[in-house]
Amino acid sequence: MIENSESGRPMLKISSDEPDARNRGSYSAVESLRLLNFTRSGAPKEHRLSRQTVTRWIRGYEHGEEGYSEPLWTPDYANDDDQIELSFRDLIELRFVKAFRDLGIGLPTIRDCYCRAVEEVQDERPFSTQRFRTDGKTIFLDITEKDHDGRMIDLKRRQQVFRSIIEPSLRDLEFDASTVSRWYPLGIKHRLVVIDPKRSFGRPIVQGGVPTEVLAAAVAVEGSVDAVARLYEVAKSEIRSALEFEQRLAA
């Protein structure tokens, strides 16, 4: 994969030993961070992920003189040198890791939770499975009873964490069979904007198929939603949703 330096999007060059990005989605470092930091609730700025943090999670990192932490999992695409490229499922897994970290849960505890979830769900990307949506609370509460230093974590707090952060994230997702298939960033009841790895390489689009960034840019040029609706033959409601999404994405 080669990254386009102007847009931050990868210029797709699929080799025989890499998974097909047409069905898995493809996100550059810039796109990944924008989507991972997207929130409908206005999360504090200090909770924004950096490229360095994502790199440590998916590549592992050295600490101390001889210490080394393994990657949480192996991403779908090769991430060599300075390039980061993620699939849709990688992106969803990282959303949940970020949610845990935002609530002060240490990475060793998250790693324990991840390994337990892999065993329970029988999938290398457990957080993006239908099984985790149904059984995730039990897995989460069992694993986070103690942090990595052995200190007890209050059950009420752990339940509140899951209810306030993890459950809403699961409600944004739609599943086909056993794994996540679509993400509705404005909410499952507000389906005008969708992220679907099988459409437009996973770029955020409106239901009619036009990328949200294209519609937002067109409104800036044309000066009105009405003009863009005529130009692209897209419903005004979809354009307004695209504008809302892009504004929050840039916040």
Image: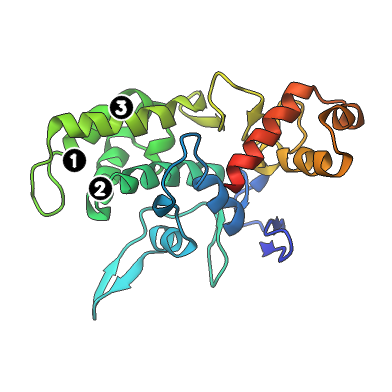
SS under mark 1: loop
The answer to whether mark 2 and mark 3 are in CB contact below 8 A is no
Q: Gap in Å between the C-alphas at discs 1 and 2?
A: 8 Å
Q: At 24% across and 77% down in the image, what residue appears?
A: 64
Q: Nearer the viewer, residue 180 or 64?
A: 64
Question: Which residue position is annotated with label 3?
Answer: 163
Q: Position of residue 44 (x, y in %)?
A: 41, 47
Crowding near pointer 3: few (<14 within 10 Å), some, many (20+)? Answer: few
Between disc 1 and disc 2, the foreground one is: 2
Near-viewer residue (33 or 89): 33
Q: Quadrant of the N terminus?
A: bottom right
Above or below, 53 relative to 157: below
What numbered label is drawn on residue 105?
2
Question: Which badge, 1 or 3, comes first in the chain's sequence?
Answer: 1
Q: Amino acid at mark 1?
A: Thr
- The amino acid type found where label 3 is placed reads Arg
How far apart marks 2 and 3 lie (CA) works out to 15 Å
At 18% from the left and 40% from the top, the residue drawn is: 144
Q: Are marks 1 and 3 in contact (CB under 8 Å)?
A: no
Residue drawn at x 32%, y 44% is: 100
**Residue picked out by circle 1:** 144
Query: Amino acid under label 2?
Result: Ile
Disc 1 + disc 2, Cβ < 8 Å: yes
Q: Earlier in the sequence, mark 1 or mark 2?
A: 2
* Residue 136 visible, this orientation: no
